Amino acid sequence: MARRLLRPRELSVYHERTRRRGVTPWVYWPARAILQPFLHLFFWLGRTGREHVPKRGAVIMVSNHRSFLDPFVIGCCVPRPMYFVAKEELFRHPLVGWFLNAMGAFPVRRGASDAESVRTARMLLERGSVLTIFPEGTRIRSGSLARPKRGAGRLVLETGARVVPVAVIGSEHSRKGLRPRPVRVRIRCGPALAFPRVDGPSPRLAGEVSARIWPCVELQWEWLGGLPPLRRAAVVGAGSMGTAMATVLSRAGLEVQLGCRTYAQSGQVADRGENADYLPGAALPRGVSVSTVGEIEFAGVDLVVFAVPTDGLAQVVAQVGDRVGRRSAALVVSKGLVEPLGLTPSHYVAERLRIRGVACLAGPAHAREMVEVGASVVLASAGADLRRQLATALGEAGLQVLVSDDVVGTELAGAAKNAAALAASAAAHAGMNVAGAAAGGVFSEVHELARRAGGGSEAFVGLAGAGDLVGTVLAEGSRNRRAGELLGRGVAADRIAGILGQAAEALDSVPLLAERARRAGIEAPALAALGALVEGSVAPAEWVESLLPAPAVGARRAA
């Protein structure tokens, strides 16, 4: 007898019981009488908008999903029995499955089309019940809300049920392992929505209805203080990389403002529909609007992208800092160090802006190729939520994104790449051996600087360092490669930006890297010599001679 009771049951048994009998009254109401006061007291349950839940008729509660607790706390907002779907794994144990089924749960096969659960849901709504669904499809434990699946819209149209948008926050912290934790959980219900009943709605129509419901859920979520999604972005800097980033983010579905330095530049780019000076032939998407930086309303922007050379970053941050909202995030694509202290760009931005998080982007991402064929990039941030948000957006735009929490290592790997590319191209006329020695010495010394600053080695051996270095050295149009070639020919560093028409960040970063290494007590002869070449205190021929092997036979320990 006991074995029969503990034998797993077919999922169809639970569906059939829900369709025929609904909840089990002698289990549901006593359990609710115990659970509801417990949830109120233990989780300091806060409920807003209960008056929006219709007291009669079919209702679909559409909610975000953070925890196993969500159906039970949402049920505290509904004065009548509420049904909900639960993953099929919970029904493998017959006693657990029986109790959940008695409380209004029925199983669903996640990741697949489950006609049986849809049929159960439709039958419940046809008899005027309350059903809670989680369109995200799975629990999203952190960050902003995920995008909904279109099943919710289909169910709404087929049944004509009214829809109540619901947001739950705090339930993701309600347990540690199997042990419950007394945390604050809050729920907010929005006004009910009504849609016409449609027989056999098309997938497109169902998707449009889901797309109209979900912003109402996001509104309740943000009212509770939840992390907003990335909807609007401002790109500061309309050079080649800034234009490419604006295009990429627009492809990800964001509304993008591209901020130019002057009215003349913004007018020219807007009129032509492309940035003819920096990225000719690459048409701007319709989702990109062009203006000056001063015209951008930063308070309403979710993401600010800093795409300016490091020597201009301080001025730009000072210009926009007080106008950026605290719930905004920043993405820094500048590579190098910021004067006068030699701070990494994201460190500089994080110290001066009161925002929710800062991330940096590195890797071989040349602007034109990124727009035309995509790129493999490294996204680094100390915040896991921001990493997930940005990685999702960039991935949807066609980029391959590797994420990291090593911000120091990632940014210094980018600075090392620029410096090594400058050294290699400046020494290339003396031979490939000399060029390799010049680049290797600089790269290894910046790696040691990163290690002393708390960064890891993975960034240097991966895309942010070695991968980007190869791409830069091979790219004939690379600013840092061309700057190194000019420097090796004896052109003064202060004239190179004018010749190139753009800044070469390595020229500003190398002296700062050498100074940071000196302050850190690191022996860095390669950086010091390259810094002297950039500053003009050493002639190119003398610098190249210092790279040549000494006549005497000997060996030097490898870094």
Image (tube, rainbow, N blue to C red):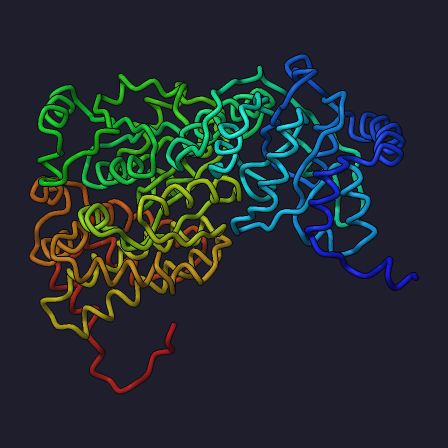
The residue drawn where x is 15% and y is 46% is: 493
**Where, quadrant-wise, is the C terminus in this rendering?**
bottom left
Q: How many marks?
A: 0
**Is residue 273 something one can see in this rendering?**
yes
List the single residue furthest toward the top. 51
Residue 28, percent from left and from top: 83, 33
List the single residue furthest toward the bottom. 553
Is residue 521 depicted above or below 347 in this figure? below
Is residue 39 depicted above or below 55 in this figure? below
List the single residue furthest toward the right. 1
Determine the image quadrant of residue 332.
top left
Residue 428, percent from left and from top: 13, 66
Residue 3, percent from left and from top: 88, 64
The residue drawn where x is 46% and y is 40% is: 389
Nearest to the observer: residue 54 or residue 400: 54
Is residue 443 depicted above or below 284 in this figure? below
**Where, quadrant-wise, is the N terminus in this rendering?**
bottom right
Q: Is residue 156 left or right of residue 447?
A: right
The residue drawn where x is 61% and y is 22% is: 224
Determine the image quadrant of residue 429.
bottom left
Nearest to the observer: residue 311 or residue 41: 41
Is residue 177 depicted above or below 304 in this figure? below
**Is residue 354 something one can see in this rendering?**
no
The residue drawn where x is 43% and y is 50% is: 519
Residue 403, percent from left and from top: 44, 52
Nearest to the observer: residue 410 or residue 399: 399
